């Protein structure tokens, strides 16, 4: 893999700091939740519903088993509200009577011997009255007579600009297509897990694998009825998340907590095995998009008309905000006078879908970008030229009505991607290759896109994130924030930002363990916000600390590490406060109308152009990635190696999304291929060379102009790959994953139609 670090006038990078969490993970000394050794521990498991919604009439505990040895928790044991706190209180912590999907938690069991838990599950019988007609398809749910919720619609949004209907009457060339994207499993390294203990002082402590400790804290407060001063949430080393540990840890934490409350002070460990994790935890939302796209003969877009729907599953969870981001990103980085995007999150009897890297944008961007290539073909235009003609430029009005300023690099990203990939040369080579009597055909495809970093619109203002910096008398500085390290490099990046601002070596900075009794709420670790939003707060707090040390501690403007420590010691000895705080302040002109979807949706967009080169076997229809070029303008790379890793990882997940990952559902709507042996993800043998190009213009809202990049690389691979396959086989493709069976079917249909 290669990395191109470029920006005109950029200073050559100094040696990049080592990851602060790297050594422990390489040596295997990092302690994950299931590694924590406990005395007199109670292991836990979950009895779940079997039908795709219905009513529980009776739970029968076989008297042949001595149930006094077990800790048993049902809905009747919940001291607080029986609802998982999130956007809406519609999802029960434990099923009381009515349930909406197979796999809902019904009974929690605890025992000191794990084998006894398996035995116990076989001695419980549940009398369920299942739904007569569960629904698992988006359009079936919309037309179903029996509704899960009114209309089976959680949210219905409209983004509108201009007059699509009028422009359609005047159109010269258009396509009308339907696109499908599947669910996708996050497949983090470490399954969901929590430890709970009710301490002697009455504090209920939860340790576990999570992204958002304050989400868990709020959920525990509501479920247990305990005040927050009697609750403590601590993040353990987290083996990956990708969005999958945003909302579900609140569920499993409540389950562990309820068992701990009945355990009489004994610690409770609830850790899922892989199959259970894959079956019951949220995945990427499947989507269905009806799309009309029109242009004049000159290749100028005239309208974008999209009906975008995502499968929300049986409970609302995070679907409204996933849908919101999908709708906002649906029109892509293009100038078009007439746009209409209707977005709906639909209720079905699948287990709830939730957050996954990209958060709705990969689904809607896939539909638009593949349609762009199909329309270009109809216009007899090269896809790159078609995009070049329509990409946004500074001064244009965005799809949400915001006038773009200097921070608009869609054209720059495209030109750089064409140059680095040698797009036109490769295109010519592939045309020549495909004319030969080879056993394969080759194609090259591209996707241009942008991704907004941070919470949408007024979300960051609502979060009111806060960061603390605590200096100590020995010159050490501690960062106190609730943002979590989950493999993405945040622990290193935040330390580096503070070290640069304080002009100190990184070993003088420490990121405190995420513990809600110690760290303030600096918002969740989601939405590509950690480096940009929280990093800016860390930098601002560091500057406040310096100012305090200079005005109150006698620190000179030019100082050594020892002089910094001396100033801290003087402050400590004189009983002066060495704690500083920084709180979020919105950028100027950050105006967003949540009802009309107009204004400035994000403080910063990262811009990208991805190019995929593929080879397809004409006999087996297997697709192989020959090369992949990923160009993105990211403002500023605080730690280029970490940024490169983020992008490479996102590209690999996108390759899996495009070609391999196929969630199969059983007859009750639960994932059937719930093992690593039959849920296929790409290996290093499947991904080909990846070129990562970082363009840095320094106009982001983060430190030194940084932007968020965590989700961006998930958006582009699937459409770029599909466009390459379309170009090679000269056929339209409207769904992923593009497995050999799909291509064979399409090829047969093409031959029949001819």
Image (cartoon, helix red, strand yellow):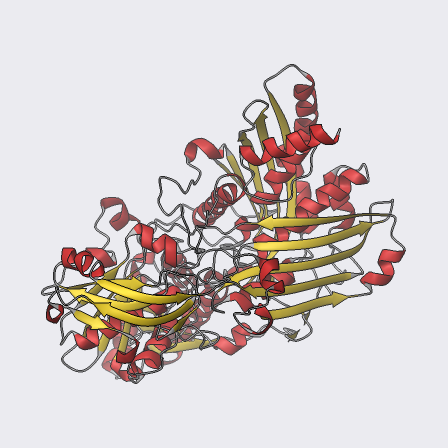
Say if residue 745 shows up in the picture.
Answer: yes
> What is the quadrant of the C terminus in the image?
top right
Image check: 656 left or right of 477?
right
Say if residue 6 shows up in the picture.
Answer: no
* Residue 338 at x, y percent in the picture: 80, 61
* Residue 457 at x, y percent in the picture: 60, 71
User: Which quadrant of the structure image shows residue 268?
Assistant: bottom left
Image check: 285 left or right of 251?
right
How many numbered dots are placed on residues in this image?
0
Residue nearest the observer in this picture, 560 or 604: 604
User: Which quadrant of the structure image shows residue 280?
Assistant: bottom left
Residue nearest the observer in this picture, 127 or 193: 127
Compared to residue 242, the image places residue 686 above or below, namely above
Kindly identify the residue that appears in the image at 17 percent across and 71 percent down.
71
* Residue 446 at x, y percent in the picture: 65, 40
Q: Residue furthest top?
A: 437
Compared to residue 576, the image places residue 720 above or below, namely above
Q: Residue furthest right?
A: 170
Kindly identify the residue that appears in the image at 67 percent across and 15 percent down.
436
Residue nearest the observer in this picture, 57 or 467: 57
Kindly identify the residue that appears in the image at 42 percent across and 72 percent down.
91
* Residue 472 at x, y percent in the picture: 27, 72
């Amino acid at each position: 893999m290669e990395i191109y670090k470029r920006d005109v006038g950029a200073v050559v990078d100094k040696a990049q700091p080592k990851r602060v969490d790297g050594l422990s993970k390489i040596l295997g000394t990092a302690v994950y939740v299931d590694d924590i050794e406990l005395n007199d521990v109670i292991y836990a498991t979950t009895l779940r519903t079997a039908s795709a919604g219905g009513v529980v009439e009776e739970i029968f505990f076989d008297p042949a088993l001595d149930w006094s040895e077990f800790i048993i928790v049902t809905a009747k044991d919940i001291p607080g509200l029986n609802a998982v706190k999130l956007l809406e209180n519609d999802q029960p912590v434990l099923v009381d009577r009515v349930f909406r999907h197979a796999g809902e938690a019904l009974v929690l069991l605890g025992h000191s011997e794990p084998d006894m838990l398996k035995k116990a599950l076989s001695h419980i019988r549940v009398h369920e009255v299942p739904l007569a007609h569960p629904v698992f398809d988006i359009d079936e749910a919309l037309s179903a007579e029996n509704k899960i919720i009114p209309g089976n619609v959680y949210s219905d949004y409209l983004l509108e600009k201009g007059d699509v209907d009028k422009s359609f009457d005047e159109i010269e060339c258009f396509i009308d297509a339907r696109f499908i994207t599947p669910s996708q499993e996050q497949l983090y390294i470490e399954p969901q897990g929590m430890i709970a203990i009710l301490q002697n002082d009455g504090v209920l402590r939860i340790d576990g694998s999570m992204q958002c400790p304050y989400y868990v804290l709020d959920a525990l407060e509501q479920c247990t009825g305990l005040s927050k001063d009697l609750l403590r949430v601590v993040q353990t080393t987290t083996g990956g998340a990708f969005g999958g540990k945003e909302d579900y840890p609140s569920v499993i934490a409540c389950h562990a907590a309820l068992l701990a409350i009945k355990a009489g002070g004994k610690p409770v460990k609830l850790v899922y095995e892989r199959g259970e994790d894959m079956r019951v935890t949220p995945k990427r939302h499947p989507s269905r998009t009806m799309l009309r796209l029109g242009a004049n003969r000159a290749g100028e877009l005239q309208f974008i008309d999209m009906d975008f729907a995502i499968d929300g599953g049986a409970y609302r969870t995070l679907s409204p905000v996933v849908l919101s981001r999908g709708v906002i990103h649906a029109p892509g980085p293009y100038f078009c006078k007439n746009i209409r995007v209707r977005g709906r999150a639909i209720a079905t009897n699948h287990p709830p879908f939730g957050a996954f890297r990209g958060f709705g944008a990969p689904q809607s961007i896939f539909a638009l970008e593949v349609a762009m290539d199909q329309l270009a073909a109809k216009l007899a235009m090269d896809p790159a030229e078609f995009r070049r003609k329509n990409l946004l430029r500074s001064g244009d009005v965005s799809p949400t009505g915001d006038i773009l300023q200097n921070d608009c690099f869609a054209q720059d990203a495209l030109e750089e991607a064409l140059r680095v990939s040698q797009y036109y040369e490769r295109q010519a080579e592939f045309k020549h290759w495909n004319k030969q009597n080879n056993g394969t055909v080759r194609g090259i495809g591209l996707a241009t896109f942008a991704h907004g970093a941070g919470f949408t619109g007024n979300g960051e203002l609502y979060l009111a994130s806060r960061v603390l910096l605590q200096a100590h008398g020995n010159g050490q500085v501690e960062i106190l924030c609730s943002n979590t390290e989950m493999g993405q490099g945040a622990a290193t990046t935040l330390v580096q930002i503070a070290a640069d601002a304080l002009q100190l070596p990184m070993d003088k900075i420490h990121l405190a363990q995420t513990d809600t009794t110690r760290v303030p709420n600096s918002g969740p670790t989601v939405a590509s916000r950690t480096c940009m939003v929280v990093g800016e707060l860390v930098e601002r707090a560091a500057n406040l600390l310096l100012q305090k040390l200079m005005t109150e501690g006698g620190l000179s403007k030019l100082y050594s590490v020892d002089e910094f420590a001396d100033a801290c010691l003087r402050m400590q000895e004189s009983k002066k406060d060495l704690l500083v705080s920084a709180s979020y302040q919105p950028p100027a002109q950050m105006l967003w109308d949540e009802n009309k979807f107009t204004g400035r949706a994000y403080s910063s967009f990262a811009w990208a152009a991805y190019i995929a080169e593929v080879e397809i076997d004409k006999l087996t229809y297997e697709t192989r990635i020959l090369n992949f070029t990923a160009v993105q303008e990211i403002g500023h790379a605080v730690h280029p190696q970490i940024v490169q890793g983020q992008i490479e990882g996102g590209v690999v997940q996108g390759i899996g999304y495009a070609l391999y990952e196929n969630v199969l559902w059983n007859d009750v709507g639960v994932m059937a291929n719930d093992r690593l042996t039959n849920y296929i993800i790409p290996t290093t043998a499947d991904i080909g060379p990846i070129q990562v190009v970082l363009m840095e213009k320094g106009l982001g809202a983060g430190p030194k102009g940084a932007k968020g990049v965590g989700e961006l690389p998930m958006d582009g691979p699937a459409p770029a790959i599909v466009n390459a396959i379309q170009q090679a086989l000269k056929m339209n493709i409207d769904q992923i994953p593009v497995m050999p069976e799909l291509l064979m079917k399409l090829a047969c249909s093409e031959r029949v139609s001819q």
